[in-house]
Image: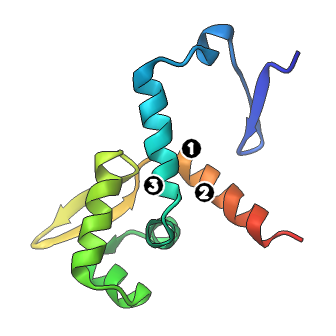
């Protein structure tokens, strides 16, 4: 019986208790995949994986309106997939969940792999 998973080339043991999914866990997992199922959010997370950015920089680099970026960042922040820090009047965003970022990078690698 398989009792582990591979993530970032590390083995993590999973117990039977980990496999019992309560409603809250199911909701969080489904919302995480919902976040990763949107092309705009994928682009934002991929950019933030490179460096922290302000809304205006994300908007410029991805050719999106600031309103769109702010809306998507709010969704990602509510799921604790991104965090922010203030510097003067600017707010900079960066990834807040390395497990989800690893999952995203694995999905991108899978999509690009022949």
In terms of sequence position, does the residue under pointer 2 or pointer 1 come before the other?
1
Q: What residue is pinned by disc 1? A: 99
Q: Position of residue 17 (x, y in %)?
A: 60, 9
Residue drawn at point x = 26 percent, y = 58 percent: 74
Residue 8, above or below 70: above
Tell me the mark number nearer the camera, choosing from 1 and 3.
3
Secondary structure type for disc 1: helix
Secondary structure type for disc 2: helix
Residue drawn at point x = 77 percent, y = 25 percent: 4
Q: What residue is pinned by disc 3? A: 35
The N terminus: image quadrant: top right
Secondary structure type for disc 3: helix
* Along the viewing direction, whichever of 97 and 70 lies nearer the viewer: 70
Tell me the mark number nearer the camera, choosing from 2 and 3.
3
Bin the neighbour count of mark 1 within 10 Å (Cα to Cα): few under 14, some 14-19, many 20 and up.
few
Q: Quadrant of residue 60?
A: bottom left
The C terminus: image quadrant: bottom right
Q: What residue is pinned by disc 2? A: 104
**Looking at the image, do the residues carrying marks 2 and 3 touch, with CB atoms under 8 Å apart?**
no
């Amino acid at each position: 019986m398989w009792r582990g998973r591979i993530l970032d080339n590390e083995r993590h043991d999973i117990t039977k208790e980990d496999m019992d999914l309560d409603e809250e866990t199911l909701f969080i997992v489904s919302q995480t995949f919902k976040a990763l199922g949107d092309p705009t959010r994928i682009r934002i997370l991929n950019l933030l994986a490179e460096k922290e950015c302000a809304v205006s920089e994300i908007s410029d680099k991805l050719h999106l309106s600031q309103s769109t970026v702010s809306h998507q960042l709010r969704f990602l922040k509510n799921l604790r997939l991104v965090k922010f820090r203030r510097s003067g009047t600017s707010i900079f965003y960066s990834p807040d969940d390395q497990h989800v970022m690893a999952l995203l990078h694995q999905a991108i690698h899978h999509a690009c792999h022949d």
